[in-house]
Amino acid sequence: LLDAVSLRHGIELVYDEHPMGGAAIDATGEPLPASTLEACKRADAVLLAAIGSPQYDSLPREKRPETGLLGLRAGLGLFANLRPVKIIPALVDASSLKREVIEGVDLMVVRELTGGVYFGTPKGRVEADGHVRAFNTMAYSDFEIDRIAKVGFDLATQRGGRLCSVDKANVLDVSQLWRDRVEALHADYPAVELSHMYVDNAAMQLVRSPKQFDVLLTSNLFGDILSDEAAMLTGSIGMLPSASLGSSGPGLFEPIHGSAPDIARQDKANPMAMVLSAAMLLRVGLQQGAAAADLEAAVDRVLDAGYRTGDLMASGCTLLGCQAMGDQLLAEL
Ligand code: IPM
Ligand code: MG
């Protein structure tokens, strides 16, 4: 699909494939070989598939696929994770929520990606007084909050003008600093309507009335959780792409879904989040908006024509496997 769409727009894409996650563990014993990280740094953009499989869950943490992903994010300085959630009209009835709740939803989760409890120290596991105790540290510095908040304010400026910052400032010191810094930055963006919401309430509001949101600004952990929840508004997490960006260097584009090991090698997976991630790579990573729009339009047309993978299947539609869905998209393109 990338070849077809780029050729049409007169762009030549040169691919360089490197293992990460399970493939890299199998080949080298490391989830993120140094050669992979170096190749990513040299690229104009990075396209990443989903990672993880139960077979790696018993490895020591530093050898697991997820650690490779965190290393890639940190190694490329990708502090801003953008997760757009837009309802596709043809899929309104695939959602577990009522049509009137989700019709017209168009929001963006802006998740901080290289800090917070995912990376904080000290962390670990200790034994004392006959008990085992494990701990992580949820910490943010002022500059980390400021740079992600700017991304949120900028996106709100380009979109609907509303930014909702999510925290747990009623309990957590780290969240109070988050709220204070976001509030202070608001002075630079008077045109943006800023609100603050506790994360528990945000989780509820997302399913109660998601249309109230334009841009949701979150820390690493809160964004991880809320973006999965927001994804389900669209009916399937198999539809959503994401972009991870730093202040310079290549961006990384990946579907927000996991590797779905329960359906591995059955030709059932929905490839559309991956295809839409490739579209995001074209638009955001390579400034090829027209090519991106072509790919996105192909997805829309295939859905309008009633083709569905199993995760989206509805009566009256045509069920396709992953491979056949890819062929259909190519034919549409
Ligand atoms: C995500 C994933 C990752 C995360 C996992 C696979 C480490 O859930 O990108 O949302 O927690 O960030
Ligand atoms: Mg997640």
Image (cartoon, helix red, strand yellow):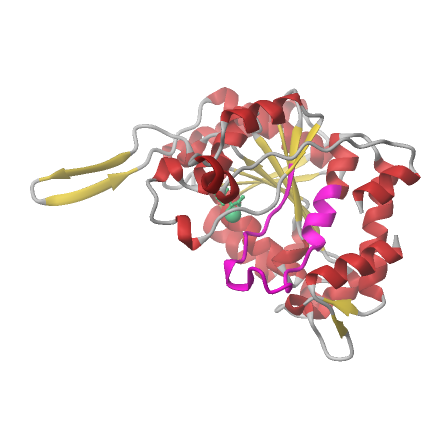
Residue depicted at x 42% and y 38% = 169
* Image quadrant where residue 82 sits: top right
The answer to whether 314 is drawn above or below residue 226 in the figure is below
Residue 271 percent coordinates (x, y)? 69, 55
Residue 111 painted magenta: no
The answer to whether 314 is drawn above or below residue 300 in the figure is below
Q: Spot the residue most to the bottom.
A: 315
Residue 35 percent coordinates (x, y)? 54, 25
Left or right of 13 in this view: 110:
left
Left or right of 133 in this view: 316:
right
Q: Is residue 184 visible?
A: no
Q: Nearer the viewer, residue 306 or 56?
A: 56
The stretch in magenta equals 253-278
Q: Nearer the viewer, residue 209 or 70?
A: 70
Q: Spot the residue most to the front.
A: 27
Residue 97 percent coordinates (x, y)? 63, 68
* Image quadrant where residue 150 sits: top right
* Image quadrant where residue 101 sits: bottom right
Residue 180 percent coordinates (x, y)? 49, 28
Q: Is residue 119 visible?
A: yes
Residue depicted at x 53% and y 31% = 72
Q: Spot the residue most to the left.
A: 129
The answer to whether 267 is drawn above or below residue 119 in the figure is below
